[in-house]
Image (cartoon, helix red, strand yellow):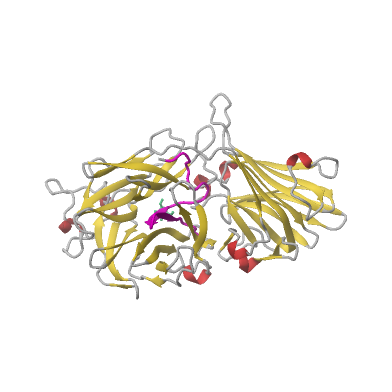
């Protein structure tokens, strides 16, 4: 079905996809970053282009005081009555369940209508033939729940009711596995207790196919036990009967290079059939335990057998060759593709007359909940990210961020006589610094990483291998440098630190995101040019 997988590499979890007039649109979770919920477009489910974001204004999601890993969890994108809809739960001190609409997928998207009755995560949106809108969502320990809503006002039109507790539901002996009476409050049955539900039923999506309704969910938690399961019913309100062949997709207990596969969405495939998008991670190292890029979006095919879907295992096939991106710092920040933490890039960065990006520091580093940092997703394990930095009027550089507690970078300050470069690594409350002196003038700072082979003979234990590098006296505004052009004493590179990336991976940081590479200022005014990302499959 695809010659490329992941279809959206780097931090792109919880994919949701819709097909409108032969074009696919896909959104993913963004947690504490703004703009939030990228909207990608594709004609073939394989090649995707970023066309906009749902949350371009902080007020739409209200994440300013939402701690990591809060913020935007698992949006669903759907199309109804000529309008695009995205429904999402924005978690922890934020707006909760909100539904946004737009006439065009690139936006602008509405301010959003809150649905206070949805007290869970991962809301899905579906309509029946009468136009009733159903929101189906997950509540921890209570399984999948549902209510009907008025999407114009956000008002609940029914009480929330239990819909399915997933494959782990232990039905009393002799009783049918899932009857309406055993699962609904309306019938007087007690709400499900944590013990009666499977582990973490979540990420529901509801579809109509012929006369049947299908309820697709994720189970097992978003780690190695993650799975995709399905149930079928005769109405959007159920009752739903689980498929005897569940899970329909998982990588648990396999040696697949993609793990944690789950949180899926179904869509008609180009040219017929059904496709499934799902999240997964690509762990590296001897024990294949650490995934620096976070949860990415993968694609696979689904076949229908006797009215039930069977998903093909996901095959990893990274896009071949080298991807070089010289980031155009002169592009208006709203269209630049940069993301920032709890504020929009335009709130913290400017572009100067020479098209260089300018950041102002306020005496804080990336431990701050509102850092002076703009970033982009790291989308290859083997990569380099560099920028030429003018730090005469401040202290700043380049960094990789997972959370306030987990980040590393290299920054500079030029006092006119000498440039002091400092590599910093922070993990779980520990920080370490390495320093070197370079000639005054622009400094080229680089972060490089390479994957470990997983080859047992080489015994490369840990995560990816990271280098924090500086080269001094680079003229700012000069044409982009290539590594081979750095010759002579002034341009000699200094490798300040080598890190084991296992400590900056999805499994260790608990940040739900992935590695975001970017530019940051600690103090004063810092200017960036020749910002270049090189990734290799
Ligand atoms: C999301 C849940 C999950 O709400 O992780 O993988 C949570 N699935 O469905 C955050 O992405």
Q: Quadrant of the N terminus?
A: top left
Q: Is residue 248 left or right of residue 373?
A: left
Query: How many numbered marks have been drawn onto this rendered protein structure?
Result: 0
The image position of residue 6, as x and y in percent, is 48, 43
Kindly identify the residue that appears in the image at 50 percent across and 62 percent down.
Answer: 53
The image position of residue 36, as x and y in percent, is 50, 62
Q: Quadrant of the C terminus?
A: top right
Q: Residue furthest top?
A: 457
Q: Is residue 95 above or below residue 513?
A: below
Q: Nearer the viewer, residue 279 or 6?
A: 6
Q: Nearer the viewer, residue 113 or 361?
A: 113
- On the question of residue 309 being in view, the answer is yes
Q: Residue furthest bottom?
A: 153
Q: Is residue 307 left or right of residue 420?
A: left
- On the question of residue 431 being in view, the answer is no
Residue 29 drawn in magenta: yes
- Identify the image quadrant of residue 23: bottom left
The image position of residue 148, as x and y in percent, is 27, 67
Q: Is residue 443 left or right of residue 465?
A: right
The image position of residue 449, as x and y in percent, is 63, 41
Residue 412 drawn in magenta: no
Q: Nearer the viewer, residue 67 or 360?
A: 360
Read off the magenta span: 2-31
Most prominent secondary structure in the magenta stretch?
A: loop
Q: Is residue 37 left or right of residue 364?
A: left
Kindly identify the residue that appears in the image at 58 percent across and 48 percent down.
Answer: 378
Kindly identify the residue that appears in the image at 81 percent across and 41 percent down.
Answer: 492
């Amino acid at each position: 079905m695809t010659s490329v997988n992941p279809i959206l590499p780097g931090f792109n979890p919880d994919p949701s996809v819709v097909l409108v007039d032969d074009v696919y649109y896909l959104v993913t979770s963004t947690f504490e970053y703004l703009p939030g919920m990228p909207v990608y477009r594709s004609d073939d489910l394989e090649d995707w282009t970023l066309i906009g974001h749902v949350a371009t204004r902080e007020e739409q999601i209200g994440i300013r005081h939402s701690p990591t890993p809060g913020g935007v969890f698992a949006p669903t994108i759907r199309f109804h009555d000529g309008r695009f809809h995205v429904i999402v739960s924005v978690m922890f001190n934020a707006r909760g369940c909100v539904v946004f609409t737009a006439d065009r997928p690139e936006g602008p998207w509405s301010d959003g209508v809150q649905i206070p009755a949805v007290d869970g995560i991962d809301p899905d949106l579906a309509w029946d033939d009468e136009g009733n809108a159903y929101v189906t969502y997950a509540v921890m320990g209570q399984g999948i729940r549902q209510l009907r809503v008025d999407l114009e006002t956000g008002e609940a039109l029914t009480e929330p009711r239990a819909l399915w507790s997933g494959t782990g539901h232990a039905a009393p002996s002799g009783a049918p596995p899932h009857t309406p009476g055993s699962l609904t409050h309306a019938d007087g049955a007690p709400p499900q207790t944590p013990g009666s539900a499977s582990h973490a039923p979540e990420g529901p999506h509801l579809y109509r196919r012929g006369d049947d309704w299908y309820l697709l969910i994720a189970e097992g938690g978003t780690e190695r036990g993650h799975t995709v399961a399905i149930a079928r019913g005769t109405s959007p309100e159920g009752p739903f009967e689980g498929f005897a062949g569940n899970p329909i997709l998982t990588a648990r207990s396999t040696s697949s290079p993609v793990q944690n596969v789950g949180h899926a969405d179904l869509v008609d495939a180009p040219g017929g059939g059904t496709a499934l998008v799902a999240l997964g991670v690509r762990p590296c190292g001897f024990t294949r335990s650490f995934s620096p890029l976070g949860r990415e979006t993968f694609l696979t095919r689904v076949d229908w057998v006797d009215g039930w879907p069977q998903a093909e295992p996901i095959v990893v096939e990274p896009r071949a060759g080298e991807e070089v991106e010289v980031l155009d710092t002169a592009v208006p920040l709203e269209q630049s593709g940069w993301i920032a933490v709890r504020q929009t890039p335009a709130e913290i960065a400017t572009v100067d007359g020479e098209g260089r990006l300018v950041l102002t520091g306020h005496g804080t580093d990336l431990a701050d909940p509102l850092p002076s940092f703009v970033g982009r997703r790291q989308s290859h394990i083997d990569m380099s990210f560099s920028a030429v930095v003018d730090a005469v009027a401040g202290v700043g550089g380049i960094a990789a961020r997972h959370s306030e507690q987990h980040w590393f970078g290299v920054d500079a300050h030029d006092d006119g006589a000498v440039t002091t470069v400092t590599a910093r690594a922070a993990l779980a409350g520990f920080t370490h610094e390495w320093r070197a002196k370079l000639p005054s003038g622009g400094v080229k700072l680089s972060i490089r990483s390479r994957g470990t082979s997983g080859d047992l003979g080489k015994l490369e234990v840990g995560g990816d291998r990271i280098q924090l590098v500086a080269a001094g006296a680079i003229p700012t505004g000069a044409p982009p440098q290539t590594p081979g052009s750095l010759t002579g004493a002034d341009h000699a590179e200094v490798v300040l630190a080598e890190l084991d990336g296992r400590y900056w991976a999805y499994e260790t940081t608990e940040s739900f995101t992935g590695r975001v590479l970017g530019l940051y200022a600690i103090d004063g005014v810092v200017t960036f040019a020749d910002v270049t990302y090189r990734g290799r499959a």
